[in-house]
Amino acid sequence: MKLPQSPPKFGPTFSKLSKERQAEVLFHPGAQSGDKRYLHWNELRHKPPPAGLSVEEWWLTTKWWRMRDYRRVPLKDKKGQPFVFSTPDGLQKGLHEIDRGLGFALNFPESIAQSEARDSYVVSALVQESITSSQLEGAATTREVAKEMLRTGRPPRDKSERMILNNYQTMRRIQELKGEALTGELVFELHRRVTEGTLDRPDAAGRFRKTEENVRVEDMEGNVFHEPPDAGELPARLEAMCRFANGQTPEVFVHPVIRAIILHFWLAYDHPFVDGNGRTARALFYWSMLRQGYSLFEFISISQILLRAPARYAEAFLYTESDDNDLTYFILHQADVIQQAVEALHAYAAKKTAELKNADKLLRGLTGLNHRQQALLAHAMRQQAARYVIEGHKRSHGISFPTARNDMFDLVARGLLTVAKEGRFNIFRPVTDLHDKLGRLADRPAPQPADGTMPLNLPFQTRHD
């Protein structure tokens, strides 16, 4: 992508106008009645201006009205100038929709709110976010292969798979850290987790970049898009970022979603590490959303939305830097991404609700099946060639190995799955006549385990698969 054209500087451009023309431009009646989007000069200059204004004059009045709403944040650029943001109507509406979707939605699908099913949905969202966040940073593997690795627990085969595994483990860790304040040590920990085993310089994990490492953001052709602040400034900048993340600065109210988005931008702007800055920035964004009370965000994947249009993601950074540090461009982009992710969450939950109802219909009459077994059988009825392992069932539902094993062998005892050894693993498959078996087993009492040497109510003592 190309660097956006920087806007005309307000002061020098405005001073060229006569006093009479200045007033006419600033208060032109049509200047604020046209396109309501928060357009960057790179986009606005291609639009027809309101009657009576040149494109440059249209930009002047647009910029003037924006500057009246600017609010400063503690983040400063390399020249010491502060970053700012405004809250146009579109952003306020978006924040309201996010709050409703993640906090005030009284009619949220019951299937995702029930505590017994919650872990399964969380794991699914974490898997999705781990894969797509890594793909944004260049990981090259299919989602099917990545999901198979995460669900079976096999070791990663290459750097791409290691990136995905690191992201998954980091996201699980963030759920444990959401009650803690952000510190430099915690930021370093998150960076170590997302980059372990993936860096060309292994010693760079969990430490600041050095001056001689000359870190820059550029494309494959060597075009530089961003040069971060000097390495010597990073300790002070990290301390200021942590104070902001913890709500200690600024003294005025900042909407929690805006605070999380700015934290995302802040780490990406400072680029304190040799590599893994994007993954760490998105991890901090998740930490911030969860810490500020958006508990449903553990079901959300923003990276799958970002991956659909990565150029727009990069563009939002560039627009901010090129227009007087106006963070509004990045905030608007990320707010839109969050809204799309919330909509995807509701659609996913509605789909799962329908699937559970259908599974309940098909499985009605069977006694003793828990929601995990029902989910597995519902999947097996759609995928007759599916193969299951205990470790995969364990990871899919966030349960212990013995509980997962009991689930699987109980289904074998009921005649709904078969099991066979392949190497050191037990491989479970749906029986060929699963639909008929479900019908015949309706209303029958749960059978005893077929293998009497391994009763399901005793602790599992043999070797783990």
Image (spheres, rainbow, N blue to C red):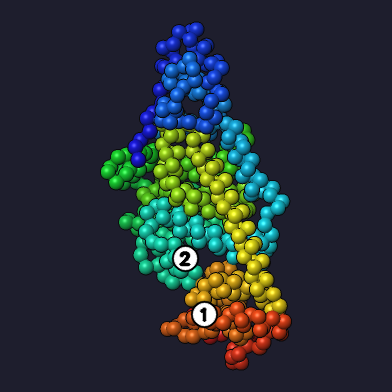
Residue 381 in the image: x percent, y percent?
A: 57, 74
Residue identified by numbered label 2: 147
Callout 2 secondary element: helix
Apparent side of residue 31 relative to residue 252 in the rendered image (left or right): left
Position of residue 374 relative to residue 417, above or below, is above
Q: Is residue 300 visible?
A: yes
Position of residue 44 relative to residue 360, above or below, is above
Q: Nearer the viewer, mark 1 or mark 2?
A: 1
Position of residue 294 relative to residue 76, above or below, is below
Residue drawn at (44%, 27%), measured in percent from left and top?
Answer: 47
Residue 340 in the image: x percent, y percent?
A: 55, 47
Q: Residue furthest left?
A: 221
Callout 1 secondary element: strand
Position of residue 462 relative to residue 203, above or below, is below
Residue 379 in the image: x percent, y percent?
A: 56, 71
Q: Quadrant of residue 454?
A: bottom right
CA neighbours of label 1 inside 10 A, class few (<14), some (14 to 19), many (20+): many
Q: Give amino acid for label 2.
A: Lys
Residue drawn at (68%, 49%), measured in percent from left and top?
Answer: 105
Residue identified by numbered label 1: 429
Residue drawn at (60%, 55%), measured in percent from left and top?
Answer: 347
Residue drawn at (49%, 20%), measured in percent from left and top?
Answer: 50
Q: Earlier in the sequence, mark 1 or mark 2?
A: 2
Q: Which of the two residues, 135 or 48, is positioned nearer the viewer here?
A: 48
CA neighbours of label 2 inside 10 A, class few (<14), some (14 to 19), many (20+): many
